[in-house]
Image: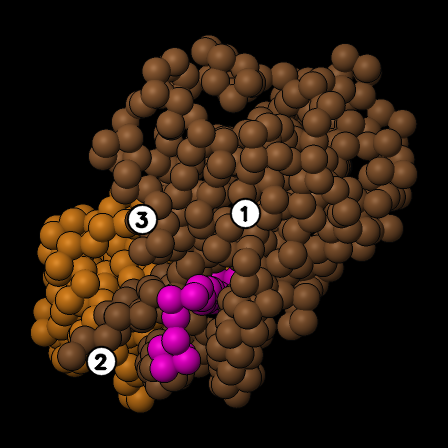
Amino acid sequence: MKRFVYADNAATTRISPQVLDAMMPWLTDGYGNASSIYRKGREARIAMEEARHKIERALGVPESRPDFPVEVYFTSGGSEADNWAIKGVAHLMAQQGKKHIITTVFEHHAVLHTCAALEKEGFDVTYLPVSDKGLIDPAQVEQAIRPDTALVSVMYANNEIGTIQPIPEIGAICKQHGVLFHTDAVQAVGNLPIQVAEQNIDLLSLSGHKLHAQKGIGVLYCRKGIKLPNLIDGGAQERGHRAGTENIAAIVGLGAAVEAACADIAGRAARLSAMRDRLIAAIGQIPRVHLNGDAVRRLPGNVNFSFEGVEGESLLLMLDALGICASSGSACTSGSLDPSHVLLGIGLPHEVAHGSLRLTFSDENTMEEIDYILDVLPGVIERLRAMSPLWERMSKA
Amino acid sequence: MLYSEKVMDHFTNPRNVGEIADANGVGEVGNAKCGDIMKIYLKIENGVIEDVKFKTFGCGAAIATSSMATEMVKGRTVDEALKLTNSAVVEALEGLPPVKIHCSVLAEQAIKAALADYYTRQGIDPTPFVGELADLDEEHLACAR
């Protein structure tokens, strides 16, 4: 029987049965508009505010009350949340003459391309380099802060190589210097304990489909008191800050997903890191491979290796033929001329970055699937290397 | 990225993979930085390509175009092989995604580079037959997508 192993959970996840159950009533009879005054509308609004409260509680929003959640805004996903946070703060603080933003070279494109768009408007952006393990030193942030710095945006955990940044330390520095702090936590929520108030996070982006909710729903957390200008104008939804009739089913699903994910962070970390570490130890036995990212400060479900002499797309196609879904940072899979900016950012030469493989796991994976990956992966690498003139040259050298 | 069944067939079961120990024409194009290198080995006797093998580092399309190009020149005369074009390789593969067309260009150039090497080994200047190969394996070609 043909095997199927889904090992690309950092790309997206399957909707979990409990999330789908939570959504179903709102995809069927619960079709009311949350802005309507009659019962069907009120029921939708109550369900939405419950979901908002669940998310606020999971993120450690101190003043959240079930009847009055205040700091979470629903968006179309992580990209909208990143755009809103960064453009919003930039335009808000520009009124005070602060037009400088600090971020890192290996953020998600939703952050990097937003910053690039702001540069065209005349904002000044500092892109901090990361270490060869993919880590930022909080001191780098402190040194980059200027009197006109409006915002620091550093991702909580990297989507490709899984490195976890020292977010509480960066938050403390930003607070001390009176600079707003945003973090793209799309890969971190449910994997790491996030407490926005304690960790001095002013703005945070998250996305539903990375944690078993559906695609097209996300959240921007924005600390009360920050008068963020709107990104999407129109109706009075989201307390007048984000127009558009709310997708109640997606919102309720997201509330259920975040609640479930954050209720079992330690258990999930233990299960996933056991799978991760088994893969890392075994793949590390293959000659001339490199683990990308830090071995310790790493998301529990992230494995990322480069295989010298092998190109990523052909590796993915061969794994696909064996029923394994994975991803790569090669140029061929990134759809651009260059391999992944994250892999180049940690200093990999192009030819090594082309040979990268990312395997990412969730609650739905099993140790038996890890065994299957380990059964077939060395043979695939060997086969590709046997036909690689680059490998031939390397092994002779 | 959608590959035709023909491309997937040549990727999954590539024809003529390997090396020829006593090859009398060897050509290599592409570079590691761009993510694709093709190396072609030819065994030519009496003006006919008796055997051909390839080794490729690259994406699915790079492997499939190498495989197809070797099939298209095997058993052909040198003159026929010189007429191989990248578009003929694309056609034989039932199409390639636009961003992968450069792989077929590389395959054509790899065959030509091997033929040029064959001429050179015979003490014949390959330029009148193969054209200028000087810039074929430069970065801009391999990375031109």
Against A367, residue A75 (above or below) is: above
Residue A157 horizontal side relative to residue A35, left or right: right
Q: Which kind of residue does numbered mark 2 sit on?
A: Lys
Q: Secondary structure at mark 1?
A: loop
Q: Colour of chain B?
A: orange
Q: Which chain is brown?
A: A
Viewer-side residue, A232 vs A106: A232
Q: Which residue is mark 1?
A: A186
Q: Which residue is mark 3?
A: A20
Residue A164 placement (x, y as % from top left): 66, 59
Q: Which kind of residue does numbered mark 3 sit on?
A: Leu
Residue B124 lies in quadrant: bottom left
Q: Secondary structure at mark 2?
A: strand
Q: Nearer the viewer, mark 2 or mark 1?
A: 1
The residue range painted magenta reads A350-370
Residue B25 placement (x, y as % from top left): 30, 75
Viewer-side residue, A287 vs A260: A260
Parent chain of label 3: A
